[in-house]
Image (tube, rainbow, N blue to C red):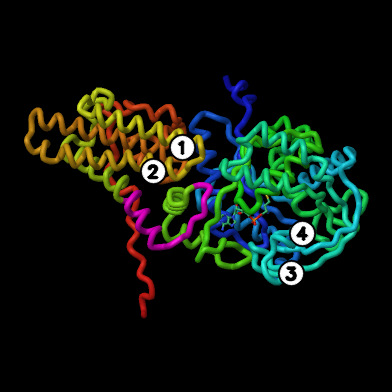
């Protein structure tokens, strides 16, 4: 019943809260696309999903970016945060919550959290001296730096800094963290990143500074407005604040009632230490439950370097979406980059993959089949797909592949999930070529009946593809569903259980065939020279 499902534990999934020092780039889009695909898959399983995304708006890096543009920090944050929202819309991201860390309710939560940690005796004041990377917003260990004290991620020199700061007693949590990782080896994903996290902890955890004396653009430290709270100590709490409704009482306790802890933090591997070490320790200190899983995916690279705002070697997601559409962008990055590993972008590869998979294997098969159906059966299915016995082997193959896709989605092997769905399309094309329904129709009589059954078998596979690929290419799948004669409402109510073979019923009238995915014409480089 409705009340029970409202109360059922939600699946809370988060993207990183992105810095607003620059507009979103393909890396930020990548994490968000992946989170959206996982969220859509969980919704297909019938779960109540809360997908959280948003922007991280405090700190020195943001203040500097704002002044470089001649804006006040607040104006600057409004503009860039809006750019994220717009891009998420263009990329078909169905988020449930968008949190900005400059939201007043967030400030209240940070203050409450700070007082809990203070009451636990986990905050103290001390001098700190070290090398600081502004782009990471982090003091660095000299051992991890390149020549001239350059940050290995941002390739810019770290600067010596000395401050009188407030510190969080991370070292107190060394043992509890070790135990948690031992007892919950699935906490860090992919599993090969667990060793790295355990290594950091084993090497010894140092208390870290959670305030900045020199940074004005931040949340003031309670009872000491000469300092602001370190941007990471503030931002991570955005995941909790996001769960609160505006009208609700703003407290950590109400966030717990609204769905905390998160089921999954999806992040890039660059911020794994913050999510798998600092954050759990902070939560333990404040007496809050830990997230169930942290998944650190790989980097999109350009010429082997992490694509990023600080290096300025990014791909414009807006440009890609405008040129190729959201489905193509979503599909390419999820299919091409094994989720967890790094992946390089090339336009040639993009065009080839998207054309081969979406335009040919899926789009063209659907279009050919519907064309034959229209010509020979007035677009009406003559039998139920469940009784088309000729397709028994094919049906078995499809069932196997759709199960493979489900397992891969569950394990967040998104590329393999796409691959399994595409295999259904490949099997459909093979089936079509083998049975040649177009020539059977020419023979008439029993051959013609067999051909009509062949078409329903292929369309049934298409129906299953439309459900199974919908987490990755939602708009394409909506169009496939419409071509199969279903209403928008029916697509909105699809559920993974409907991937079971035999959904198409005799008598169903298909729509007028029209291409669901336009082939991308090869991009001509250097057209004028
Ligand atoms: O770190 N490839 O924000 P951020 C893949 N505000 N993913 C990439 C990427 C790339 N080249 N570049 C960025 C922050 N990302 C903090 C987070 S969370 C409470 C605070 C993605 O804007 C990836 O998920 O620098 C990475 O972890 C994140 O963007 C960093 O975003």
Marks 4 and 2, the one that precedes in the sequence: 4
Q: Nearer the viewer, residue 28 or 299?
A: 299
Marks 3 and 4, the one that precedes in the sequence: 3
Q: Residue at x 63, y 56 (%)?
A: 82
Instruction: Please tell me in which quadrant of the rendered image residue 424 appears.
Output: top left
Instruction: Please tell me in which quadrant of the rendered image residue 323 appears.
Output: bottom left
On the image, the x and y values in percent for residue 90 come to 51, 53
Q: Secondary structure at mark 3?
A: helix
Residue furthest to the top in view is 1
- Mark 1: give few (<14), some (14-19) or many (20+) Cα within 10 Å: some
Q: Is residue 524 left or right of residue 407?
A: left
Quadrant of the image for the N terminus?
A: top right
On the image, the x and y values in percent for residue 303 come to 50, 66
- Mark 4: give few (<14), some (14-19) or many (20+) Cα within 10 Å: some
Q: Is residue 96 at all visible to an observer of this figure?
A: no
Which residue position is annotated with label 3? 67
Which residue position is annotated with label 4? 139
Q: What's the magenta region?
A: 339-359
Which residue position is annotated with label 2? 419
Residue 408 bears which disc, if any?
1
Q: Residue at x 62, y 31 (%)?
A: 10
Q: Nearer the viewer, residue 488 or 178?
A: 178
**Is residue 220 depicted above or below 97 in this figure?**
below
Please tell me whether mark 4 or mark 1 is closer to you in this view. 4
Decide whether residue 450 is among the magenta residues: no
Q: Residue at x 69, y 49 (%)?
A: 273
- Mark 3: give few (<14), some (14-19) or many (20+) Cα within 10 Å: few
Q: Secondary structure at mark 1?
A: helix
Whole-number angstrom distance, CA of label 3 to CA of label 1 = 46 Å
Please tell me whether mark 3 or mark 1 is closer to you in this view. 1
Please tell me whether mark 3 or mark 2 is closer to you in this view. 2
Q: Is residue 223 at all visible to an observer of this figure?
A: yes
């Amino acid at each position: 019943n409705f009340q029970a499902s409202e109360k059922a534990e939600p699946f809370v999934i988060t993207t990183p809260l992105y810095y607003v020092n620059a507009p979103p780039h393909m890396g930020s889009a990548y994490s968000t696309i992946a989170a959206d695909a996982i969220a859509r898959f969980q919704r297909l399983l019938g779960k109540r999903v809360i997908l959280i995304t948003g922007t991280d708006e405090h700190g020195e890096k943001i203040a500097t970016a704002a002044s470089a543009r001649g804006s006040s920090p607040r104006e600057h944050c409004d503009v860039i945060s809006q750019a994220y929202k717009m891009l998420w819309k263009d990329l078909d991201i169905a988020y449930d919550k968008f949190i900005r860390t400059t939201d007043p309710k967030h400030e209240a939560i940070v203050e409450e959290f700070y007082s809990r940690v203070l009451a636990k005796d986990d905050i103290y004041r001390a001098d700190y001296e070290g090398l600081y990377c502004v782009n990471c917003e982090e003091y660095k260990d000299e051992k991890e730096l390149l020549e001239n004290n350059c940050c290995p991620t941002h390739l810019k020199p770290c600067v010596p800094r000395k401050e009188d700061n407030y510190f969080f007693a991370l070292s107190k949590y060394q043992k509890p963290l070790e135990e948690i990782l031992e007892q919950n080896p699935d906490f860090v994903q992919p599993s090969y990143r667990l060793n790295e996290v355990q290594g950091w902890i084993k090497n010894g955890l140092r208390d870290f500074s959670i305030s900045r004396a020199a940074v004005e653009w931040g949340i003031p430290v309670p009872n000491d407005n000469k300092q602001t709270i370190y941007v990471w100590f503030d931002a991570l709490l955005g995941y909790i604040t996001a769960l609160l409704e505006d009208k609700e009482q703003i407290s950590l306790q109400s966030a717990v009632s609204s769905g905390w802890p998160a089921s999954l933090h999806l992040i890039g591997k660059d911020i794994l230490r913050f999510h798998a070490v600092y954050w759990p320790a902070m939560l333990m200190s404040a007496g809050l439950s830990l997230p169930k899983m942290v998944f650190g995916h790989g980097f999109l690279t350009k010429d082997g370097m992490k694509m990023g705002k600080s290096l300025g070697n990014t791909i414009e997601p807006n440009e890609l979406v405008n040129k190729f559409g959201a489905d193509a962008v979503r599909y390419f990055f999820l299919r091409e980059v094994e989720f967890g590993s790094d992946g390089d972008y090339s336009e040639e590869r993009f065009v080839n993959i998207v054309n081969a998979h979406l335009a040919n294997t899926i789009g063209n098969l659907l279009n050919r089949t519907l064309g034959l159906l229209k010509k020979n059966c007035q677009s009406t299915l003559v039998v139920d797909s469940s009784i088309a016995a000729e397709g028994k082997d094919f049906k078995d193959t499809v069932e196997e592949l759709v199960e493979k896709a489900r397992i891969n989605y569950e394990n967040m092997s998104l590329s393999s999930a796409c691959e399994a769905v595409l295999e259904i399309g490949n099997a459909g094309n093979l089936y079509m070529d083998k049975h040649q329904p177009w020539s059977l129709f020419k023979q008439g009589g029993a051959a013609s009946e067999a051909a009509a059954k062949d078409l329903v078998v292929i369309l049934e596979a298409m129906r299953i593809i439309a459900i199974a690929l919908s987490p990755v290419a939602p708009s394409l799948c909506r169009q496939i569903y419409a071509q199969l004669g279903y209403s928008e409402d029916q697509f909105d109510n699809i559920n993974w259980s409907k991937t079971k073979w035999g959904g198409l019923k005799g008598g169903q009238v298909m729509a007028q065939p029209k291409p669901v995915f336009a082939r991308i014409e090869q991009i001509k480089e250097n057209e004028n020279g």
